């Protein structure tokens, strides 16, 4: 790996080199490095598609796998399909994400399709970060798809972060949540200039006592645009909560579109949305402490997102 590779991997996956344990590092449409162990096995797909299959052994605890992707060329469309098979009672962390460095005026795009199959009683913490840099005229685009199937008593915790510099993102997350299973999503997005970010969630609470908690926090600056679309379906005795909170600056726009479908009379579904500017009294208080208006805004945004 060269200096650029290492810098991108540090930003999207907190890696300072090749990690220990199981990992798959992908660069410019090809596998750069891969390793497995007896607890988490990573294998090439057998159906001819680009991507990997990740098998987590039943009962594995406190283990992690890194599967980051980096693009360092313009004019490249990278499409990858990764499937995760999480054994019964396992408890693991998956660190993914993609960083694009595009020095051209053309397009660099990554489409990642991730499918999670969680067996009974398993827990997955899935961390995904997106980041773009390079020529301001070059496009850095992402179209991530996450599909999850949660069996009885399983838990999926998703942490999705867009770090900045991304021209366009269109994220789709779908989940089917079984009996006593839990889906927790924490999304953080910041856009500026003319960037565009769309987040779409479709969650089906099919099992008795299933739960979902989807929280999106976002900041839109300059002339950027964001859209948050949620579709929450309750088909049993269940609880679902969706929340979209946004800070709007300059000439930016944030659109929140909720849909709630209580198929069962025992379903309890809640949607909350709040979009607005930074309160003037907060800015004044920080500026009296010696901060400029820009510094005060950045301090409030940092506290809101992190």
Image (cartoon, helix red, strand yellow):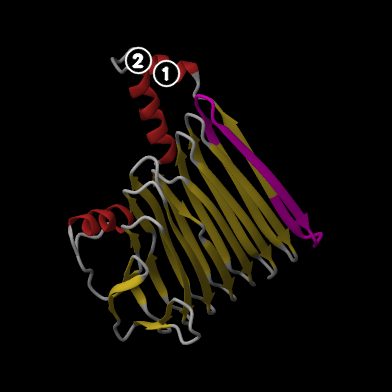
Residue tagged 2? 287
Percent position (x, y) of residue 75? Answer: 40, 57
Q: Would residue 64 be seen by someone viewing this image from the given angle? A: no
Q: Is residue 28 left or right of residue 16?
A: right
- The image position of residue 135, as x and y in percent, is 33, 43
The disc placed on residue 283 is 1
Is residue 71 toward the left or the right of residue 209 in the image? left
- Is residue 290 visible in this depiction of the protein? yes
Residue 279 lies, in percent from the top left, at: 50, 21
Q: Is residue 257 magenta?
A: yes
Secondary structure mostly seen in the magenta stretch: strand
**Residue, x 52% and y 42% (percent of image)?**
196
Q: Residue at 20% across / 59% down in the picture?
A: 16
- Mark 2–mark 1 Cα distance, whole angstroms, equals 6 Å
Q: Quadrant of the C terminus?
A: top left
Q: How many marks?
A: 2
| Contact check, label 2 and label 1, Cβ < 8 Å | yes
User: Bounds of the magenta span?
Assistant: 246-269
How dense is the environment of label 2, judged by Cα within 10 Å: few (below 14), some, or many (20 and up)?
some
Q: Nearer the viewer, residue 246 or 211?
A: 246
């Amino acid at each position: 790996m060269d200096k650029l590779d290492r810098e991108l991997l540090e930003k999207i996956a907190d890696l300072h080199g090749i990690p220990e344990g199981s990992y798959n590092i992908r660069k410019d449409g090809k596998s750069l490095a891969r390793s497995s162990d007896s607890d988490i096995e990573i294998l090439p797909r057998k159906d001819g598609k680009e991507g990997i299959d990740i098998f987590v052994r039943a009962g594995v605890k406190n283990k992690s796998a890194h599967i980051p992707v980096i693009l360092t060329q313009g004019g490249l469309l990278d499409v990858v399909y990764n499937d995760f098979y999480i054994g019964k009672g396992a408890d693991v962390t998956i660190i993914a994400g993609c960083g694009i460095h595009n020095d051209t005026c053309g397009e660099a795009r990554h489409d990642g399709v991730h499918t999670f199959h969680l067996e009974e009683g398993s827990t997955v913490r899935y961390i995904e970060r997106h980041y773009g840099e390079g020529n301001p005229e070059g496009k850095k685009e992402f179209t991530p798809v996450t599909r999850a199937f949660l069996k009885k008593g399983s838990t999926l915790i998703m942490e999705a972060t867009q770090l900045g510099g991304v021209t366009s993102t269109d994220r789709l997350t779908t989940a089917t949540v079984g009996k006593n299973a839990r889906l927790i999503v924490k999304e953080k997005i910041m856009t500026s200039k003319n960037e565009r970010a769309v987040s779409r969630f479709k969650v089906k609470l099919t099992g008795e006592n299933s739960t979902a908690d989807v929280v999106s926090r976002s900041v839109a600056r300059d002339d950027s645009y964001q859209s948050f679309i949620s579709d929450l379906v309750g088909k049993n005795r269940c609880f679902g909560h969706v929340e979209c909170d946004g800070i709007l600056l300059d000439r930016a726009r944030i659109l929140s579109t909720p849909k709630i479908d209580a198929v069962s009379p025992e379903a309890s579904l809640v949607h909350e949305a709040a979009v607005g500017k930074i309160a003037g009294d907060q800015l004044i208080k920080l500026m009296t402490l010696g901060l400029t208006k820009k510094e005060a805004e950045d301090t409030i945004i940092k506290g809101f997102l992190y």
